[in-house]
Image (cartoon, helix red, strand yellow):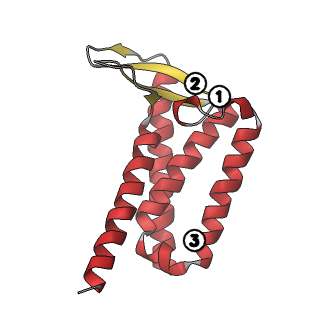
């Protein structure tokens, strides 16, 4: 269990630090306009596609409660944590980075804006990592279930 917690926290802090470092580049003024996508600073007051922005200040506290709840669940369900320590650490690190933005900047720092053929939501590295982590956890679970069924 200790080894898995170390993996979890390394992944957590690695993603958290990388995400915050990238965001600082945009807060310091970097931007770029491209044909397919642009890198422009925005602050998202809600979650994906600005949903739940009406919750205003309450949103960050709800999200903290959710992340703490997931962490407690993982500590209790040691098997789940042991099976996906790195991906769960990265997932919670990315989520925590976005929550940190809400306290420091009043909203999540987003900067990738896809605008070729359609306007897509503006997102950031943490958002990509959250999606990747969910896919990897599902893939590992599916693969493990398939292997145990043979």
Who's the residue at 71% across and 54% down the image?
A: 65
Q: Please tell me whether residue 114 is drawn above or below residue 47 in the rendered image.
A: above
First reached walking from the N terminus: tag 1 or tag 2: 2
- Around disc 2, counting alpha carbons within 10 Å, would you say few (fewer than 14), some (14 to 19), or many (20 or more)? some
Who's the residue at 33% across and 78% down the image?
A: 145
In three-dimensional space, the C-alpha distance between marks 1 and 3, rounded to whole angstroms, equals 29 Å
Evaluate if marks 1 and 2 touch, with contact meaning CB atoms under 8 Å apart: yes
Evaluate if marks 1 and 3 touch, with contact meaning CB atoms under 8 Å apart: no
Q: Which of marks 1 and 3 is in front?
A: 3
In three-dimensional space, the C-alpha distance between marks 1 and 2, rounded to whole angstroms, equals 8 Å
Image disc number at residue 105 = 1
Residue 84 in percent (x, y) is at 42, 69
Residue 39 in percent (x, y) is at 38, 21
Would you say residue 138 is visible in this rendering? yes
Residue 45 in percent (x, y) is at 63, 28
Quarter holding the C terminus? bottom left
Say which residue label 3 marks. 74
Say which residue label 2 marks. 43
- Around disc 1, counting alpha carbons within 10 Å, would you say few (fewer than 14), some (14 to 19), or many (20 or more)? some
- Which structural element holds mark 1? helix
- Which structural element holds mark 2? strand
Who's the residue at 76% across and 34% down the image?
A: 57
First reached walking from the N terminus: tag 2 or tag 3: 2
Q: Please tell me whether residue 89 is drawn above or below residue 82 in the rendered image.
A: above
The picture quadrant where one finds residue 118 is: top left
The picture quadrant where one finds residue 114 is: top left
């Amino acid at each position: 269990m200790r080894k898995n917690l170390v993996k979890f926290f390394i992944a957590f802090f690695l993603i958290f630090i990388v995400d915050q470092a990238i965001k600082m580049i945009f807060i310091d003024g970097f931007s770029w306009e491209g044909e397919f996508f642009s890198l422009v600073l925005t602050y998202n007051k809600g979650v994906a596609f600005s949903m739940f922005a009406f919750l205003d200040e309450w949103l960050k506290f709800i999200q903290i409660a959710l992340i703490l709840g997931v962490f407690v669940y993982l500590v209790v369900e040691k098997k789940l944590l042991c099976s996906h320590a790195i991906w769960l650490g990265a997932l919670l690190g990315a989520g925590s980075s976005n929550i940190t933005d809400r306290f420091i900047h009043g909203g999540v720092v987003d900067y990738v804006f896809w605008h070729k053929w359609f306007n897509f939501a503006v997102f950031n590295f943490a958002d990509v990592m959250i999606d990747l982590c969910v896919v990897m956890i599902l893939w590992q679970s599916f693969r493990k279930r398939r292997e145990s069924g043979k």
